[in-house]
Amino acid sequence: MQTTQTPGRLLTAMRAKNPLVQNITNFVAMNIAANVMLAAGASPAMVHTKEEAGEFARIASALTINIGTLSPDFLAGMKEAAKAAGEAGKPWVLDPVAHFATAYRRAAVADLMKLKPTIVRGNASEIIALAGSQSSGHGVDSGDPTEAAEGSAITLARQSGSIVAVTGEVDFVTDGQHSVRIMGGSALMPRITALGCSLTCLVGAFAAANPERPFEATAAALAMFAVAGEEAAISAAGPGSFLPLFLDRLATLSPETLDTKARIVSA
Ligand SMILES: Nc1ncnc2c1ncn2[C@@H]1O[C@H](COP(=O)(O)OP(=O)(O)OP(=O)(O)O)[C@@H](O)[C@H]1O
Ligand SMILES: Cc1ncsc1CCO
Ligand SMILES: [Mg+2]
């Protein structure tokens, strides 16, 4: 039986490892997600083409896949990388951006789910639809509150064997048996594009450094965003000034402060 690790200890492990994380993410998110990871203490690499994605996944410590701006070349690279990560026993995270919107996205996500992601991270509408229920999502933004997705998240975790994380005003993480809610963040966060995509990449970094504990690693990454977001919002005048304050807070947040301020409760 492993001892419980606090989010602060998992953050310390992540920064100590400075994990190389391969992110196959979307064109909107690439820059902000790389900056979020560097600020938090990880080493991002955005490597997606099929000619090298599988090879790179074998040298990275974790992989994240996000279908936000999907194309046939990206999808081929995603499948190569997910297969390689699975074969190498490396954790990988799937962000099923707006997968319900088109037949192409639905089919792509169904194929990627068959490759058994360690963790799935999405907003409430994405997780509800992935579990097979009717969601109110409009494009990449959620139209549902997290609490409406909790049952779907548990069902999806049991069906898939993945850890499932739902984000929104409240976050929810489940392995199908145990679940937690994470409070914090700011209403400014969904008003800046690709912060959810960036969080998916950070979940990959925490899982890379703590591969035996994907559930706790996921909760710790979400808690880091929640605490840094809440604190950045105190002096932000709006979405524009929030973003640099948020990056600064990710960089300066100490493990002790994360442990003191994280609000993670059993669900
Ligand atoms: N109303 C809110 N209050 C507090 N925090 C929020 C709120 N909405 C989102 N967040 C936080 O913002 C971060 C991104 O989550 P969100 O659910 O907006 O992702 P997303 O919809 O996938 O975003 P994107 O697709 O733009 O990347 C998470 O840390 C989440 O907790
Ligand atoms: C705006 C947008 N469009 C496709 S992906 C993306 C980033 C947020 O998911
Ligand atoms: Mg998203």
Image: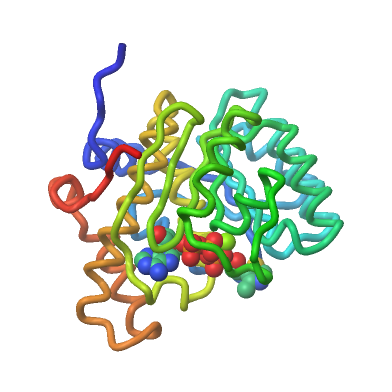
- Which residue is rendered at x = 42% and y = 47% of the image? 172
- Which residue is rendered at x = 33% and y = 76% of the image? 244
- Which residue is rendered at x = 34% and y = 60% of the image? 39
Nearest to the observer: residue 177 or residue 40? 177
Residue 232 image offset from top left, x and y in percent: 26, 72
- Which residue is rendered at x = 25% and y = 30% of the image? 5
Is 62 situated above or below 262? above
The reply to whether residue 33 is in sight is no
Residue 31 image offset from top left, x and y in percent: 53, 68
Quadrant of the snapshot with the N terminus: top left
Q: Residue furthest bottom?
A: 237
Residue 174 image offset from top left, x and y in percent: 46, 36
**How many numbered circles does the render carry?**
0
Specify the quadrant of the image occupied by residue 137: bottom right
Is 239 situated above or below 222? below
Ligand 1 positioned in quadrant: bottom left
- Taking the image as shown, residue 2 lies to the left or right of residue 175, namely left
The reply to whether residue 257 is in sight is yes
Quadrant of the snapshot with the C terminus: top left
Nearest to the observer: residue 82 or residue 3? 3
Instruction: Identify the coloring.
Output: rainbow
Residue 131 image offset from top left, x and y in percent: 66, 43
Specify the quadrant of the image occupied by residue 186: bottom left
Q: Residue furthest top?
A: 1
